[in-house]
Amino acid sequence: EDQVTQSPEALRLQEGESSSLNCSYTVSGLRGLFWYRQDPGKGPEFLFTLYSAGEEKEKERLKATLTKKESFLHITAPKPEDSATYLCAVQAQGSQGNLIFGKGTKLSVKP
Amino acid sequence: NAGVTQTPKFQVLKTGQSMTLQCAQDMNHNSMYWYRQDPGMGLRLIYYSASEGTTDKGEVPNGYNVSRLNKREFSLRLESAAPSQTSVYFCASTPGQLGYTFGSGTRLTVV
């Protein structure tokens, strides 16, 4: 069964304190792995797509990496505005675009 | 602004009532999806439409029906609402292998 597990469930950081979020996945043929950011009361906002092991993508203070079993979202010198829930999702080969989501990591960055 | 528009944003129903959640996208995307998001459960796929004229069941389709009215619009209908259908509903669309674009959600309470 395809599944996605994110850890930790919640993470509290001080402003400037770098850390990483983990996304472990089991899928029958990975077509793509996606990271989203979700603010309270809003829909998820697309951040990155990773397609193959070894791939990395960056956007401002965020960098996503991918191995054959997991992905990391590294947050460098976070700011309070980075506070949000970060969602990981996978798309399996032959899935017609359906995504399987993890439960998310709620990040709080204190000034 | 281009994107996914969902209506209504909030709704309270009595058990047994019916309603239709509306979703429209103006990005000329082929595929559209309906997800529900519950605390501690993550996003779960209800129904999807890979292209105009087709619809398929997702992980949790019971109690729901969908209509792909045209390429832009994909509606979700609750025929006889139940308290277990209290949730936040998100519509999303994608042109293919790129990440989804999500709407802002419909917050539904069934009493």
Image (tube, helix red, strand yellow):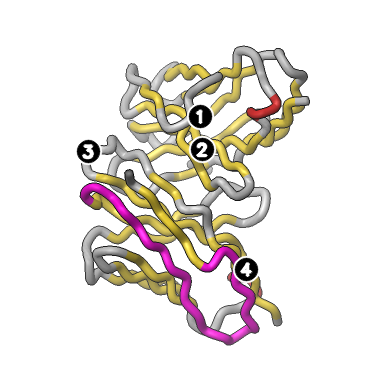
Quarter of the image that includes the N terminus of chain A: top left
User: Mark 4: which amino acid?
Assistant: Ser
Mark 4 vs mark 3, foreground winner is 3
Mark 3, Cα crowd under 10 Å, few <14 / some 14-19 / many 20+, is: few
Q: Are marks 1 and 4 in contact (CB under 8 Å)?
A: no
Residue shown at 49% from the left, 57% from the top: A87
Above or below: residue A66 compared with residue A27: below
Q: Nearer the viewer, residue A55 or A46?
A: A55
Mark 1, Cα crowd under 10 Å, few <14 / some 14-19 / many 20+, is: many
Would residue B44 be counted in the magenta stretch?
no
User: Mark 2: which amino acid?
Assistant: Val
- Element under disc 4: loop
Q: Which residues are magenta?
A: A8-29
Would residue A13 be counted in the magenta stretch?
yes
Q: Are marks 1 and 2 in contact (CB under 8 Å)?
A: yes
| Residue beneath disc 1 | B24
Residue shown at 60% from the left, 63% from the top: A106
| Residue beneath disc 4 | A83
| Residue beneath disc 2 | B4
Between discs 4 and 3, the one toward the N terminus? 4
Residue shown at 40% from the left, 25% from the top: B57
Label 2 and label 4: CA atoms lie apart by 24 Å
Q: Are marks 2 and 4 on the same chain?
A: no
Label 1 and label 4: CA atoms lie apart by 29 Å
| Residue beneath disc 3 | A94
Q: Are marks 1 and 2 on the same chain?
A: yes
Q: Are marks 2 and 3 in contact (CB under 8 Å)?
A: no
